[in-house]
Image: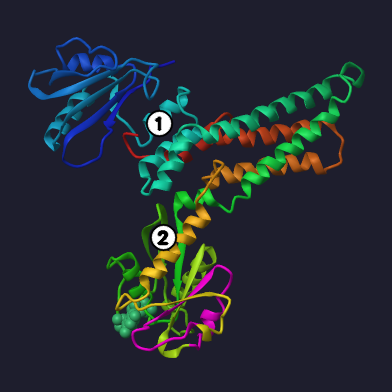
Amino acid sequence: MTERDTIFALASGKGRSGVAVIRISGPAAGDALRRLSAEELPQPRQAKLCALSKPDSGELLDRAIVLWFPGPASFTGEDVVELHAHGGHAVLSGLYDALEALPGVRPAEAGEFSRRAFENGKLDLTMAEGLNDLIWAETDAQKQLAQRQLEGALSEKYGDWRGRLLKLLAHAEAAIEFSDEDLPEGFEQAILPGLGALREEIGAHLEDRHIGERIRSGFRIVILGVPNVGKSSLLNALAKEEAAIVSAEAGTTRDVIELRIDLGGFSASLADTAGLRESENLIEQEGARRARDRARKADLKLLLVEAQSWPRIPDDIGAEADANSWLVVNKCDLEEVDPNESPLGELRTFCVSAKTGEGLHELLAALEVEVVDRLGGLEHMPLTRLRHRRALEETTKALGRVLEADHGDPALTAEDIRLATRALGRITGRVDVEEVLNVVFADFCIGK
Ligand code: GDP
């Protein structure tokens, strides 16, 4: 086996900073430090101030705090050096050039540190994903979910299920190898209840109303309305930002404009859509198509209508009303509105003015309560990713074939249990990992 490259990258954020951390990982990490510094390697895991110089000319690059983590007690499991240098552009590029000139040392690719940690058994795939989520977390709920995942809450759950499946697989295989007389009484019969119980647990985990995925990617709120009712104005007023185009000309928002807001510690996306109305204009038709598509995927729809035409509701908007919709009457500064006259009496109704701000506080407070109600109070670690969901669905499908198909063929039973085990193992990276690795680490940044 050829020795692995030693990789380096900026581990701290980009841009000018007081201190920047360069992480170096691989078999030549210790040597790299010896080449840059005349001093002895620091004691493991103890900070030491070192002068770092160009190996060829001896020119001073920086005076930095250096940490030495001999493998396997390091993030990647390899020898790791951290240089806590001054975070200026010239300092860092000098250090990069000096490192890159060393034999066997090169800049890291995106996600490469975490990938090595995975390959060295420091993290499984769900933990690596949790780490990435933690780096990207914007709200408190996202942070907590990511931390639980990084600490192994999903690994534990999926690992436990996989362990039980493997045991049942061993039993199924024993049933093929040995005749009934050689096996303990009721041996084969015990397999089905075991599989049934597992399918039930996995099924309950799958039926979580996508809470974990919502916490991670954001609760989706979409504003729907005919042109000019004030959708962009409402988006801006709610987000207190001027991100959407507010204009008096009908049909200006032809695409979906989205903002992220924090509602009670949860991330929510608020989307302003093109106006829903019949139009000859092809671009406007496409905008309306995208708006309807967005509405289908939304967790909550705000159906926006105008006070001047209250209580009449345009057909295109009435058609969108369902249990996930609220009615919002805008421009209440122009006309007094009685919410009790609503033709969609079953929908919660709010009267607001995006212009004066009237009623917005109540609407925002209600949104916050709704999001916290629907996403909060998690007892169990939920599913957080579509990748996991797909694999679990594959697992339950394979288990369903064994439980429902009355084939009674032990070889087919064993094969389906094997497929179920493999699907489950792909989540944490225990089997056929190559194909999933690229997917998982591709959205990491360099230096992670
Ligand atoms: P959209 O096409 O639904 O996105 O509507 P806009 O947000 O672009 O608003 C259309 C027009 O209505 C603009 O002239 C806004 O200034 C105006 N408008 C929006 N909200 C209100 C409101 O609450 N009160 C009043 N008086 N005018 C509003």
Neighbor class of circle 1 (other Cα within 10 Å; few <14, some 14-19, many 20+) is many
In the rendered structure, which disc, 2 or 1, sits on the residue that comes first in sequence? 1
The reply to whether discs 2 and 1 touch (Cβ–Cβ < 8 Å) is no
Q: Residue at x 29, y 78 (%)?
A: 356
Amino acid bearing label 2: Ser
Instruction: Read off the residue under disc 1.
Output: 114
Instruction: Read off the residue under disc 2.
Output: 269
Neighbor class of circle 2 (other Cα within 10 Å; few <14, some 14-19, many 20+) is some
Residue 234 in picture, x, y percent from top left: 36, 73
Q: Secondary structure at mark 1?
A: helix
Q: Residue at x 25, y 14 (%)?
A: 31
Q: Is residue 338 magenta?
A: yes
Q: Which quadrant holds the N terminus?
A: top left
Ligand 1 lies in which image quarter?
A: bottom left
Residue 196 in picture, x, y percent from top left: 76, 38
Q: Residue at x 19, y 42 (%)?
A: 15
